Amino acid sequence: MQHRQVQRAHPLLDGLDEVRRVADALPVPARVGAFARLNAGSFIVAHIANREDLLWNVGARGRTRDAWLAAANTGPGAPRSVPAWDDARESLDRIIEGVMPHLESLTAADLAGTVEYRGAQHPMGAQLARSAAHVFYHAGELQALGSLAGMPDLGLPGRLARCARG
């Protein structure tokens, strides 16, 4: 039973792998906001890390907010900015490495519970699905930015290794 439950986190975990893969391939112009009216890749990467930190570190486990992300101000509704690429990319790795063991260890009891996000309690299963959609949405946004800068199509959504294993 637990294997089936943990499987619910697989789309999010695969999405986080894909965001890293696309971010690593992103050409410099797409990283630093070279395209008017479009978010810089650094903003998108920090925005993804911000949501996952607030949800899975702070909301689900009561951990302290990532200080760099709090200062970067890349949450929903934040004004567009161009955070330093290296800092944004490092924040993504830091958050993913921190939340991955938690997401991989979710039990049926965890999934039946709620998680706090933006001042309200939400069903854990719904937030897993919402996070996966959010992560893949922004992976596609990064792919589009990269395409404008000459990056080849990376074949999103990718291998979905965890989902494929079942």
Image (tube, rainbow, N blue to C red):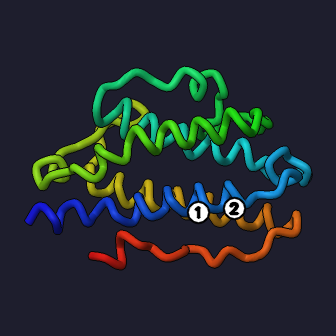
The reply to whether the C-beta atoms of the residues labelled 2 and 1 are less than 8 Å apart is yes
User: Dot 2: what SS?
Assistant: helix
Query: Which quadrant would residue 115 be assigned to in this image?
Result: top left
The crowding category of the residue bearing disc 1, from other C-alpha atoms within 10 Å (few below 14, some 14 to 19, many at least 20), is some
Res. 141 mark: 2
Q: Nearer the viewer, residue 99 or 125?
A: 99
The residue under label 1 is which amino acid type?
A: Tyr
- Judged left or right of residue 55, residue 7 is left
- 37 versus 64 height, above or below: below
Res. 102 mark: none
The crowding category of the residue bearing disc 2, from other C-alpha atoms within 10 Å (few below 14, some 14 to 19, many at least 20), is some
Q: CA distance from mark 2 to mark 1?
A: 6 Å
**Residue 158 percent across, percent down from the top left:** 54, 74
Q: Residue most toward the left?
A: 1
The residue under label 2 is which amino acid type?
A: Glu
- Name the residue at 36% across, 69% down: 162
Res. 137 mark: 1
- 143 versus 38 height, above or below: below
- What quarter of the picture does the N terminus occupy? bottom left
**Residue 67 percent across, percent down from the top left:** 55, 20
Query: Which quadrant would residue 125 be assigned to in this image?
Result: bottom left
- 45 versus 154 height, above or below: above
